Amino acid sequence: MALLRRYAFVFVLLLTAAWVMVLDRPIQQKGLTIAALSKFFSPFVGFWANEEARLPNYPVNIPTGRLKQPAKVVYDSLLVPHIYAQNLEDAAYVQGYVLAQQRLWQMDFIARASAGRLSEILGRGKDDAILKYDLEMRRSGMGFAAQNALQAWQESPETMPIVQAFTDGVNAYLSYLTPKDYPVEFKFLDYEPQRWDPLKSAYVLKYMARDLVWDERDIENTNARKIFGPELFDYLYPEHFRGQSPVVPDTAWDFNPSKTFVPPHLGRPEDLISYRSEHRTDEGWGSNNWVLSGQRTLSGHPILCNDPHLSLNLPSIWFLVHIVTPETNVFGVCIPGAPGVIIGFNENIAWGVTNASHDVKDWYKIQWADAERSAYKIDSIYKKPTLIIETINIRGEATVYDTVRYTEWGPVVCTDPSDPRHDLALRWLAHDKSNEALTFLKLNTAKNYQDYLDALQHYTTPAQNFAFASRTGDIALWVKGLFPLRYPQQGRFVQDGSLSENYWQGFIPNEHAPHQVNPQRGWCSSANQHSTGPDYPYYYLGRFDAHRGRYINERLADIDRATIAEMMDLQNDDYSIKARQFMPVFLQHVQEKQLDTLQRGWLRDLKRWKYRYDTEDAMPVFFKLWFDKTKSLAFDEMQRSDYPLPMPEDWAFLQMLIQAPYHDIFDIKSTPAQESALQILTNSWKETVDEVSAWQEKHPRTPITWPGQQEHAARHLLPGLKGFSVTLWAPGDKSAPNALGTTLGARPRTSGPSWRMIVDLSPEGKAWGVFPGGQSGNPGSPYYANFVDAWSSGNYYELDLWKSEAEAVKEALCTISFF
């Protein structure tokens, strides 16, 4: 005992030292490297310091030495910065500062994700998932695309000074930052923010471009045509929906189209391709926009509405900003990491964008000269690829090097013979030098239709539907981008990269792009449907929505004197034209005699459903489960583990159910019986009721509701930080104007209206907007997710174009002066 007392102090000291060693070690969790607990919980620099009060404690005066003239930021009650500057460069500088102040970690993370540099901060991840992601981004040429965008900016005297000023503003904020004030994610992951540069802004914009065009089906279509044969392939995968309501409905095209030639042999690869992308864009991402002329509104002046449907993350993809200079007075949302307003309005015009869904990515099979892949064949000539060595630093591990071969088509995504993707080169329009940033900078200062048209001339990719309205009464919509001039079905399948005849044959002339200006019907609209009808003289392809655009046009046709309230209702409308069309067919085919009492009871309830995805209704749950199970059983042939195959479009599925319910495609190959659509619908209804009943048994006190079954959430960009995510209890479905939907998988992802905006273009007009998040990127801020309740309930905030500081100061939380 005496000995124990004598050495007690030593024991305590050793125990304390052991705990210190444990607490000081970085933690490995689910493949991620996170900060040591001692650092993260430090009372001096840990996460405690990130708690923010409702009244921000920002510096009042910021000496910069960079501005040409003094500038000011007035933060209003929503933490929206109203930037007052004497020129556009100074405004961009201040915008860079406030974006870094509110969203620094998000900017850093998205730039890294685009550049394939996540392994530097996260490690290789579980099952090498993060390393594989980085390799995918490098091999797909994201760096090549960003460098070419930067070069285009540097060649533009209108763009580069703005981008550089924005960069200097970001770095000005970084110069004041201490470890105590680092955003909490830097502390959690234990790394430091790096200085910003213009290339990072290019990476941020290319990340958006990739998200909006990555859902192509070249490989899947190639496999399907090979497996099913041309005749069945054409039946299963028609390109045009007869009942569509295209963006531009005109059937007479007043121009002489450029000619294309069809090669004598199309040269498609003969082998099946088993590559399945691990990072495919969620189906259903899109947007709505429409603009009404004064002849269709109660005020007699145009109204413009826009709601882009993107991944609903926290921090939000968007940031509200108001910029006032002698050149402009513009309000809207920007992308953290890039200057200017992307969707918004000024004193003269308003504009909004939706994804046009055109496919501008083609895959080519390369024919090499030898096993070393030292040269590739085009016609009778062998050319040497350009070798780019990608250096991937992995946190806590040895560096990985990857050699990417660039051909005339683009980068070869993989040359490992064990990888089923090997020897496919990617021709992607986003690799080309282009200056989309200038389009938005010009829209910010545009005063009329001609200025809008001039701005669009600089836009290349991803293809977007640009809606426009002016206070002088003009409305318009252009489907804008650079569109490859292709022969019919070129780009729909993997092409032979050894034949020069498979090059794109130029581009569709700008003036031939689908568009409307002051149409007779009194409105323009788009919702990711086909840009035109099949009579358009140029071939294009993509993944087009068949539901929302038809319903929106139906509603707009019925409104003669539109009000702002009606436009808000339409943006939040949860009615599904898809359900309206499928339900009668489902009910006609289901064999009720084969159902038990419970199954017939639920079916009777479903028959009374009004096709709305309301928050308290159970019927949407039954319909979605029934639809998904039916389609899965109907197209069991497409669900192979060896070769990826595309699922038929929903509208093509409906056509098959109506016209050929006994077609062999409905037979389930794994059963001895010969099934028809009737039996499939009956079986899938039984499975639906069984699944819901099993859920009810596990949750006897919880009612069946649509949001309760869908796991809708605005999730933090880091999967491990569930506490920084927010549940979204809201109505809607991907087939409804309020296009809310969750894609399940290893990491569920919710997509939907990421920003709702309505602008009244009357002389005294106002604007309204909301997004599911908040202005701050700090989870410890009251402004992190304070918009969510308003967004979920369909409410909006008024957006005021305060021209003078004095007007803004009346509503100010705080002000910052820059000099």
Image (tube, rainbow, N blue to C red):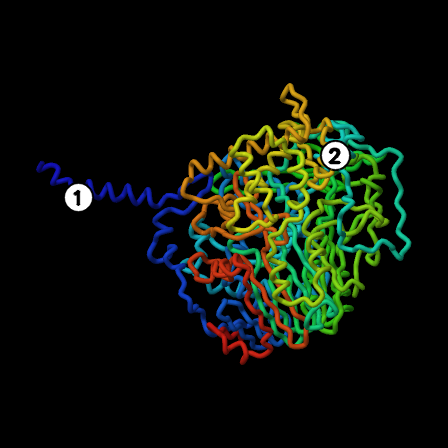
**Which residue is at 61% across, 48% downward?**
611
Answer whether residue 549 is visible to the viewer in this image. Answer: yes
Q: Which x, y percent locates residue 595?
A: 57, 30
**Which residue is at 58% across, 56% downward?**
754
- Farthest residue toward the bottom? 806
Structural crowding at the residue carrying mark 1, measured as other residues with C-alpha within 10 Å and reported as few (<14), some (14–19) or many (≥20): few
Per the image, label 2 sits on a secondary structure element best described as: helix
Answer whether residue 375 is visible to the viewer in this image. Answer: no
Per the image, label 1 sits on a secondary structure element best described as: helix
Q: Earlier in the sequence, mark 1 or mark 2?
A: 1
Of residue 232 and residue 318, the one placed in the foreground of this image is 232
Q: Could you tell me how far apart the alpha carbons at marks 1 and 2 are, in whole angstroms?
A: 79 Å
Q: Which x, y percent locates residue 702?
A: 43, 44
What is the number of the mark on residue 312? Answer: none
Q: Check disc 1 and give the amino acid type.
A: Phe
**Which residue is at 64% across, 27% downward?**
642
Asked if the residue at tag 2 contacts the one at tag 1, i.e. Cβ–Cβ closer than 8 Å, the answer is: no
Structural crowding at the residue carrying mark 2, measured as other residues with C-alpha within 10 Å and reported as few (<14), some (14–19) or many (≥20): many
Q: Is residue 681 left or right of residue 49?
A: right
Of residue 812 and residue 134, the one placed in the foreground of this image is 812
- Farthest residue toward the left? 2
Q: Is 633 located above or below residue 792 in the figure?
A: above
What is the number of the mark on residue 236? Answer: 2
What is the number of the mark on residue 9? Answer: 1
Of residue 771 and residue 399, the one placed in the foreground of this image is 771
Q: Is 652 located above or below residue 779 in the figure?
A: above
> Which of the 4 quarters of the picture holds residue 255?
bottom right
Q: Which x, y percent locates residue 466?
A: 72, 59
Q: Is residue 273 left or right of residue 602?
A: right
The N terminus: image quadrant: top left
